[in-house]
Amino acid sequence: MSTHDELPLADYDHLPLGALRHRIRALTEEQLRRLLEYERSHADRLPVVEVVTARLRQLEGGATPSPGEPDAEPLPERPSPPQGGSPVTPQTAAEPSPPPRHGHPDHPGQSK
């Protein structure tokens, strides 16, 4: 079992998912396997396992590590959309109105 000190990314436990996605591109299959083993035996975060597994499959399929990526600055994380509920309050909601009358002779698109 891999320990934190044996990981190829020293700050692995503190990397946001977006940064991890970029940083692992420079790792070899062996290094990715160590990360995956460590992750599964510690936090076992599904999104992290999926990202590392996907990259491992790419390498097994013939991709090669991209040099220079371990120190790349991560892209800023996109903010998550609000969970549940509407930001509309009774004070900011539109005034209710009756539905339009269908078939009314003055209604656009209706024949007279």
Image: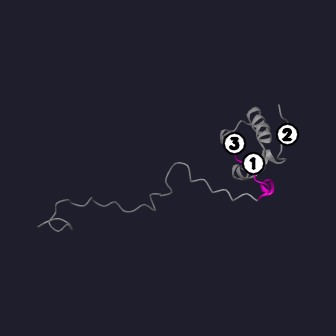
Q: Residue, x 77% and y 37% (percent of image)?
A: 33
Q: Is residue 35 left or right of residue 78?
A: right
Q: Position of residue 91 (x, y in %)?
A: 45, 61
Q: Quadrant of the C terminus?
A: bottom left
Q: Which residues are magenta?
A: 56-72
Disc on the earlier residue, 3 or 2: 2
- Disc assigned to residue 48: 3
Q: Residue, x 82% and y 47% (percent of image)?
A: 9
10 Å neighbourhood of mark 3: few (<14), some, or many (≥20)?
many
Determine which residue is flagged by label 1. Answer: 24
Disc on the earlier residue, 1 or 2: 2
Residue 37 falls within the magenta-colored stretch: no
Distance between mark 1 and mark 2 Cα atoms: 16 Å
Distance between mark 3 and mark 1 Cα atoms: 11 Å
Q: Nearer the viewer, mark 1 or mark 2?
A: 1
Disc on the earlier residue, 3 or 1: 1
Q: Position of residue 108 (x, y in %)?
A: 21, 68
* Residue type at the position of mark 1: Ile
10 Å neighbourhood of mark 2: few (<14), some, or many (≥20)?
some
Residues 45 and 69: in front is 69
Distance between mark 3 and mark 2 Cα atoms: 16 Å
